[in-house]
Amino acid sequence: MKLTWMVLCYIGGASGFQIFGIQTPQIMDSIPRRLCELLTSTKNCYYWRPRYSHQNRVGGPYIEITVSPLVTSEFIRVLDISWNCGDQCRPGDWVALYGKPPANKNEPSLYEDVVLAKKGWVRTGVQEMRKYPRIARFHSRCLGYWAAYWSLHQDEPVATTCLMTNPTWMEDIWEDIKHLKLNEVFLPGSHDAGSYTLHYQPYIQRKYEKYLYNQDETILEQLIHGSRYLDLRIAYYESMGYWVNHQIVRTQMLHLVLEDVLLFLNNTREILIIDLHGFPIGFRGSMDAHEAFLDYLRAYLGEHMAPFTGYDTTLEKIR
């Protein structure tokens, strides 16, 4: 499956907002950090770090776990480890993946590999198999996998992390970001967020699925993992009502998507941007059709909808 996350970044000047498509899920901590530092500067990048972590210094060594979007008849949701050891690299260093928090460097691992470069990544072959809890939880939690960067010369790991959810990352760093304006923030987002399908076992991907689906998490799961920008394409069918489409193909009933959004907003204090990116079917440029759709949206999300603001509005004023 070609799972794509969309990163929305304001880089200033005439460039304005830029969209970056990235084929990897659960990237709240790693790829946005690297893109933000590349496109702006570290002083404009605010990071939320897992509690289970020795990584506290911006620009310091780090290790991350991501879930590969690739699927075959034998593998699905394989875990990848990426790292950057900064100026602390030493010959003999290694990275390891665990099924529980490692007590020490002698702890048996699910996978380990010698580090041969300052930064890089490895595919572990370990399949995550959808560790997302059946009951939604609106606090950060590890999802059963931990990673550590070890050095022969240190008893403590150089860096650690876990595969985890990020349902309240904005609230967790609110004091650092509340003064920022919309044109100063860097948000992870989901491209064609409503074009998702769920698979729990390896399968042979058909061409139809490859080009129809962009996500393998529900809307609620995307939000709990950290997405704060949902890209939706809305269609209307007289006999079936409102749907989320991938262009001309129906993917999800809109009311199910909005119920996920509402559940998330009712249980957090996060700011969410919904981009109604297109109306491929059923609107035909009709203002009446759009007004009816706005009434439909207000019925679900009215109490959470922000008034009209400009890009120079701060996050604090929006919330």
Image (tube, helix red, strand yellow):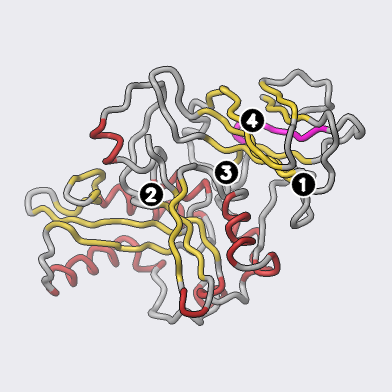
Q: How many angstroms separate mark 4 from mark 1 (CA)?
A: 19 Å
> What segment is highlighted magenta in the picture?
142-150
The percent coordinates of residue 268 (x first, y second) are: 53, 57
Residue type beneath disc 1: Pro
Q: Residue at x 18, y 72 (%)?
A: 291
Q: How many angstroms separate mark 2 from mark 1 (CA)?
A: 36 Å
The percent coordinates of residue 215 (x first, y second) are: 38, 42
Mark closer to the chain start, 3 or 1? 1
Assign the magenta stretch its main secondary structure. Answer: strand
The percent coordinates of residue 270 (x first, y second) are: 52, 61
Name the residue carrying label 1. Answer: 61
Mark closer to the chain start, 3 or 4? 4
The percent coordinates of residue 5 (x first, y second) are: 45, 49
The answer to whether mark 2 and mark 3 are in CB contact below 8 A is: no
Of residue 169 and residue 104, the one placed in the foreground of this image is 104
Of residue 167 and residue 66, the one placed in the foreground of this image is 66
Answer above or below: position of 276 versus 115: below
Mark closer to the chain start, 2 or 1? 1
Name the residue carrying label 4. Answer: 145
